Image (spheres, rainbow, N blue to C red):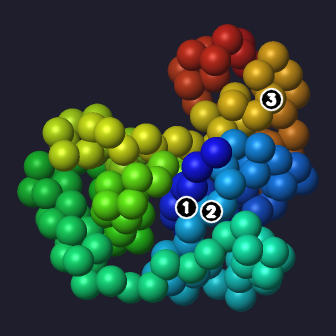
Amino acid sequence: MSTAVADTCFLVHWLRFRERERIFEVFESIAVPVMVLDEMGARGRVMLAPWLASRRAFLIPRINDHEVEALRLVEFSRSQRLPTLDPPEAYCLAVAKRRGYAVLTDNKAPKYLAQILKDYSTVKVLDSLDILSLIYGDDLAEAVKAYKEDTGLVFSKTRLKTYGINS
């Protein structure tokens, strides 16, 4: 098993999922940048606390090298008129590249950048649907339904079809 670094959007959704603990069937631990923690708000921090206390999640402090790289990514995405990449998402990408972690995000921009930037081609970027698929396999349709009920997140029909779900 490996480590993943999670952005705010992913954590806000995943921590509301009734079977959120199952993520540890895929990853040994989840890294949370301090800037993501700051963005989560009080409720999100309370929901994350059990993972931190059990050491299944850990905090990544602000590190200048990561911040410089994150700024470079944000500037690149804006100059190329790509999907908007927020600083915490960019920070997660920078950490993942340096540490060999996967990135967990429900935003399109990090996944897109990892596909088009040669320097990031080895960074695995996964969203909630990817993780649900890894955990639930053949029972994915039921898991997607439960995830939507718990989080309110609706996956696109196109994405669902790529996983064999016609809904």
Q: Position of residue 35 (x, y in %)?
A: 46, 81
Q: Residues within 10 Å of mark 3 (few under 14, many from 20)?
A: some
Q: Name the secondary structure under disc 1.
A: strand
Image quadrant where one finds the C terminus:
top right
The alpha-carbon separation of the residues under discs 3 and 2 comes to: 19 Å
Q: Position of residue 96 (x, y in %)?
A: 39, 57
Q: Amino acid at mark 3?
A: Tyr
Q: Is residue 146 or residue 30 the one in the foreground? A: 30
Residue 103 appears in the rendering: no
Q: Name the secondary structure under disc 3.
A: helix
Q: Which residue is mark 2?
A: 30
Q: Which residue is mark 1?
A: 6
Mark sitting on residue 50: none
Mark 1 touching mark 2, by CB under 8 A? yes
Sequence-wise first label, 1 or 3: 1
Residue 74's quadrant in the figure?
bottom left
Q: Amino acid at mark 1?
A: Ala
Q: Position of residue 14 (x, y in %)?
A: 72, 56
- Residue in view at x 32 percent, y 61 percent: 98
Q: Please, which residue is most extreme toward the left here?
A: 79
Q: Which residue is mark 3?
A: 136
Q: Amino acid at mark 2?
A: Ile
